[in-house]
Amino acid sequence: MKPIYAEKPLSRDGNDRDIRPRKRARSVTVNLAESPLGWLRVRGLVSDRQFVAGEQIRRDYETALLG
């Protein structure tokens, strides 16, 4: 899948709700096409088995929302 990059502002405490910076806010570039679970897998923080289970849960959840 082709990366889709976006700039996301960061608040001082790490909470992304209601950000109203008085000065220039810090930001990060994120890949919107990459799943958080995929990010963890690439970095070795979840096993292959955990990744497959997580993807199955995601698919089930998304399918349930369609109906």
Image: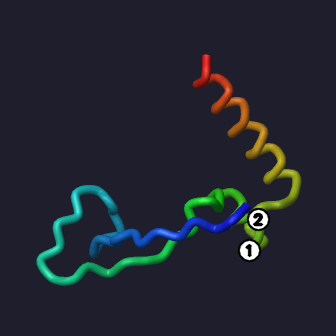
Task: Tell me the quarter of the image containing the N terminus.
Answer: bottom right
User: Label 2 sits on what residue type?
Assistant: Arg
Disc 1 + disc 2, Cβ < 8 Å: yes
The image's colour scheme reads rainbow
Q: Position of residue 4 (x, y in %)?
A: 57, 65
Query: On the rendered structure, is 25 left or right of 36?
Result: left
* Residue topped by disc 2: 41
Mark 2 Cα-neighbour bin, 10 Å: few <14, some 14–19, many ≥20: some
* Residue topped by disc 1: 43
Query: On the rendered structure, is 24 left or right of 65?
Result: left
Front position in the image: 4 or 13:
4
User: Label 1 sits on what residue type?
Assistant: Arg
Front position in the image: 43 or 59:
59
Front position in the image: 49 or 25:
25
Q: Residue at x 34, y 72 (%)?
A: 10
Which residue sits furthest left?
22
Q: Position of residue 28 (x, y in %)?
A: 44, 77
Q: Is residue 62 above or below residue 27?
A: above
Circle 1 — which element?
loop
Which residue sits furthest top?
67
Could you give the CA–CA distance between mark 1 and mark 2, rounded to whole angstroms?
A: 5 Å
Q: Residue at x 48, y 76 (%)?
A: 29
Query: On the rendered structure, is 14 left or right of 6?
Result: left
Q: Position of residue 5 (x, y in %)?
A: 53, 70
